[in-house]
């Protein structure tokens, strides 16, 4: 791969930033500095013995780092046909360790691309990053870890503790299903073109949950949606439509939550218990 053209040259040769409206719509902000892409690949841990799924490879900066770091095979999912064309030289240089998948990542189920063990490592497009994560959380089978770049405000929500302004539904779902850690931030100047916001790399490692714990996820989704749909309301008001007034008062008393408490002040275990009680009502 040492003979490949520079990433800047790849972008220029294939006009990857020629259509600014398309680039914005696809959320394309490319990482060209190999020291940064190498750092992301390293943050994902040992790659030897793993298949890696990358979303939105663009000109292939992170893809090169993943291959260099020893991934058994990289499956790069790219929607933009111009980027797919730009990646052809890297495909040829990969010695059979790279597969290009031209598709909308929102419609791709990772487990259908490759057998486990697999890791997802990606600089996610800002406009679909949160939805992609929510999709993957619904099926973590075979996923060893996810190392993902988000805009920083999303990363803060993923790892937020109870009582903070960033704590909400995304925090609870991620932390119920995974061990989540925000690793490092990147300034807008790290990207081409530079976005208007800082970015953060987050590492998520799926927890080993019992069948009972897994069965609570749909109820946890409904409870958190109700609780944070109007987050300034007291919990007795926001969850009343789900439980009914009398039952909710009983449940809150059992889990030692004052009825006037705000949703952002309840812990992950409070929400787990609420989901369990709600499952018994359904």
Image (spheres, rainbow, N blue to C red):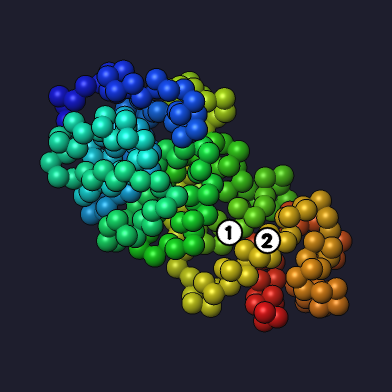
x and y, in percent, of residue 159 in the image: 58, 48
Q: Quadrant of residue 59?
A: top left
Q: Residue at x 57, y 28 (%)?
A: 197
Q: Quadrant of residue 41?
A: top left
Please state, as top left, top right, bottom left or bottom right, where the C terminus lies in the image.
bottom right
- Is 214 left or right of 257, judged from the image as shown? left
Q: Residue at x 46, y 56 (%)?
A: 136
Q: Residue at x 87, y 61 (%)?
A: 260
x and y, in percent, of residue 87 in the image: 25, 33
Task: Check the image and report above or below for 179 versus 105.
Answer: below
Q: Secondary structure at mark 1?
A: helix
x and y, in percent, of residue 22 in the image: 45, 29
- Residue 24 seen: yes
Question: Residue 192: which disc?
Answer: none
x and y, in percent, of residue 165 in the image: 72, 44
Earlier in the chain: of badge 1 and badge 2, it is 1
Name of the residue lying farthest toward the bottom: 280
Name of the residue lying farthest toward the left: 95
Say if mark 1 contacts mark 2, CB within 8 Å: yes
Q: CA distance from mark 1 to mark 2?
A: 8 Å
Q: Nearer the viewer, residue 42 or 235?
A: 235
Mark count = 2
Residue under pointer 2: 224
Q: Residue at x 69, y 75 (%)?
A: 278
- Is 81 left or right of 216, judged from the image as shown? left
Pointer 2 local density, CA inside 10 Å: few below 14, some 14–19, many at least 20: many
- Is 117 left or right of 200, judged from the image as shown? left
Residue under pointer 1: 173
């Amino acid at each position: 791969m040492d003979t490949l053209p520079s990433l800047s040259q790849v972008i220029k040769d294939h006009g990857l930033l020629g259509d600014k409206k398309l680039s914005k719509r696809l959320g394309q902000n490319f990482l060209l500095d190999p020291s940064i892409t190498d750092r992301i690949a390293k943050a994902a841990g040992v790659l030897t013995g793993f298949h890696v799924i990358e979303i939105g490879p663009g000109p292939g900066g992170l893809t090169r780092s993943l291959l260099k770091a020893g991934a058994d095979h990289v499956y790069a999912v790219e929607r933009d046909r111009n980027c797919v064309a730009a990646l052809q030289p890297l495909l040829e240089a990969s010695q059979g360790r790279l597969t290009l998948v031209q598709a909308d990542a929102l419609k791709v189920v990772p487990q259908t691309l490759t057998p486990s063990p697999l890791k997802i490592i990606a600089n996610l497009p800002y406009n679909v990053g949160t939805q992609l994560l929510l999709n993957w959380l619904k099926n973590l089978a075979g996923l060893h870890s996810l190392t993902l770049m988000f805009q920083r405000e999303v990363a803060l929500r993923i790892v937020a503790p109870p009582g903070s302004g960033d704590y909400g539904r995304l925090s609870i779902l991620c932390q119920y299903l995974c061990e989540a850690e925000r690793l490092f931030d990147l300034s807008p100047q790290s990207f081409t073109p530079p976005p208007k916001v800082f970015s953060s790399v987050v590492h998520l490692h799926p927890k080993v949950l019992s069948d009972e714990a897994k069965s609570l996820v749909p109820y946890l989704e409904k409870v958190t949606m109700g609780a944070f749909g109007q987050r300034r309301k007291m919990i007795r008001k926001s969850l009343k439509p789900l439980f009914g007034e009398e039952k909710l008062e009983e449940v809150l008393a059992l889990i030692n939550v004052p009825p006037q408490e705000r949703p952002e002040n309840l812990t992950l275990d409070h929400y787990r218990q609420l989901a369990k009680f709600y499952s018994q009502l359904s």
